[in-house]
Image (cartoon, rainbow, N blue to C red):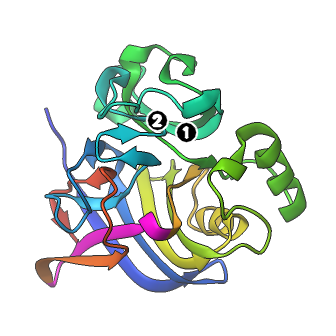
């Protein structure tokens, strides 16, 4: 049985001292990772852009659906064996009420610590380490040491640009996916913590960052951010919008 719930789209708010935040809060059961042909505006889904990509046919980060199957070529692993923070959504008990999410620093889907058949979806980016008590310097040092972010660019203390993020809030089994007009990675981490997330990663950002949502007032999609093709996304398909 497919269970769908209501989602909400919060626009241009301030969270944890960071302004220009847009985010969708959706039931974890209504979230999936999709391959798309271009940008979010021209797709049939609401949500945020996903992992890194090379072109329309090749991804440069983990983007998988049920059973850990890549949604597009390249989506099963990171390039050059780089480890990257990846949010996995999984169901170990085969019960809808038991679906949950956790972040793991991996190079490919096979490194997920559970059974591959448990995986509903996974999306890769850079770790935000929201569970850890880390100051700014310690956070950047940890990610630089473990995830080789220099190949991505625009990552470091004081480096601000548009950002895309995804997190999991276990208190109500919600996935929080969002867009920030301008922030550094450590500020993105603070936003997720302020929103009650215990897991989360920063997705492809800068010129790729975009979000698409709806409100109860109108069924017309609202698009914010970049308009370039991103070729994969995290989609929210709720029964209705608040």
Which residues make up the magenta segment?
Answer: 207-217
- 210 within the magenta span: yes
Q: Which residue is mark 1?
A: 86
Is residue 11 shown above or below 76?
below
- 9 within the magenta span: no
Q: Position of residue 116 (x, y in %)?
A: 42, 16
Residue at position x 67%, y 52% in the image: 128
Residue at position x 15%, y 85% in the image: 217
Location of the C terminus by quadrant is: bottom left
Is residue 57 shown above or below 21?
above
Q: Is residue 76 left or right of residue 41?
A: right
- Front one among 139 and 118: 139
Q: Secondary structure at mark 2?
A: loop
Q: Which residue is mark 2?
A: 62
Q: Position of residue 62 (x, y in %)?
A: 46, 35
- Front one among 131 and 147: 147
């Amino acid at each position: 049985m497919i269970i769908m719930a209501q989602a909400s789209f919060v626009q241009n708010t301030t969270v944890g001292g960071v302004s220009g935040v847009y985010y969708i809060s959706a039931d974890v059961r209504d979230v999936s990772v999709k391959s798309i042909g271009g940008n979010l505006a021209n797709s049939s889904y609401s949500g945020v852009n996903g992992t890194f990509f090379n072109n329309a046919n090749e991804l440069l980060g983990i983007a998988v659906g049920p059973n850990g199957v890549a949604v597009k070529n390249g989506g099963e692993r990171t390039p050059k064996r780089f480890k990257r923070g990846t949010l996995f959504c999984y169901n170990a008990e085969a019960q809808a009420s038991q679906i949950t999410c956790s972040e793991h620093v991996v190079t490919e889907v096979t490194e997920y610590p559970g059974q591959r058949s448990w995986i509903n979806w996974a999306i890769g980016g850079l770790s935000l380490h929201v569970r850890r008590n880390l100051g700014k310097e310690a956070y950047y040092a940890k990610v630089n040491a473990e995830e080789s972010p220099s190949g991505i660019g625009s990552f470091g203390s004081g480096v601000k640009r548009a950002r895309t993020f995804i997190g999991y809030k276990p208190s109500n089994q919600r996935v929080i996916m969002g867009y920030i007009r301008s922030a550094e990675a450590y500020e993105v981490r603070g936003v997720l913590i302020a929103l009650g997330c215990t897991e989360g990663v920063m997705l492809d950002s800068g010129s790729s960052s975009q979000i698409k949502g709806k409100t109860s007032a109108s069924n017309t999609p609202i698009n914010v951010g970049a308009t370039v093709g991103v070729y994969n996304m995290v989609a929210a398909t709720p029964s209705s919008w608040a």
